[in-house]
Image: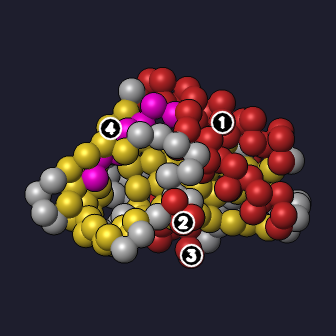
Amino acid sequence: MSNLPSTDENFGAVNIRLTDEPLEPMVQATSCEEPWLSHPDAGAILWFHGVTRRQTKKGDHVTITKELSYTAHREMAVKQLNELANNAVHEFGLHRVVIWHRLGTVPIGQASVIVGCSSAHRVAALDAVAAIMDRLKQDVPIWKQEHFESGECHWIHPSPTTDDPRTH
């Protein structure tokens, strides 16, 4: 995995990663210190970890997921993630933004995406994380395929309402 920044000065406002490696080592690094999001003017630091869940309910029907897999147009995805993060810095007045996305197979309970934001106040960070996730799912060329315990699998089409519990 990559090196953690050792000081605030050597880390820019935006950090984007697409990786084929598990994100858990990076998750552990975020829990002991906050070097990725630290800023002397930050009053709020917020991390969101999107993990693979086992059950998906749609009405009375429950589907058991075995794992997820992700693929991307890497060059375009990195470009769009950078644009997304930089736009969020300006739109929400953030100090720092981290977007790390895993590609390949992601088992149950492991992280497929991590978004972090720091800002002067909590509302900006909370709003920014939600907006970044919605826009990432809708606009960035990263595709998800669900693999079920039944042996079936299907692609998930990007949608801003993919994780909306009202649709399940």
Earlier-in-chain disc, 2 versus 4: 4
Residue 105 position in % (x across, y down): 25, 52
The residue carrying mark 3 is 32
Earlier-in-chain disc, 3 versus 2: 3
Residue 52 position in % (x across, y down): 36, 64
Residue 120 position in % (x across, y down): 88, 61
Earlier-in-chain disc, 1 versus 3: 3
* Residue nearer the viewer, 63 or 68: 63
Q: Residue at x 20, y 50 (%)?
A: 153
42 in the magenta segment: no
Residue type, label 4 = Thr
The residue carrying mark 1 is 84
Label 4 Cα neighbours within 10 Å, binned few <14 / some 14-19 / many ≥20: some
* Residue nearer the viewer, 124 or 34: 124
Q: Of discs 2 and 4, which sits in the foreground?
A: 2
Task: Say whether residue 102 is left or right of residue 90.
Answer: left
Proximity of marks 3 and 2: CB atoms separated by less than 8 Å: no
Q: CA distance from mark 2 to mark 4?
A: 24 Å
Q: CA distance from mark 1 to mark 3?
A: 27 Å
**Mostly what secondary structure, the magenta segment?**
strand
Earlier-in-chain disc, 3 versus 4: 3
The residue carrying mark 4 is 71
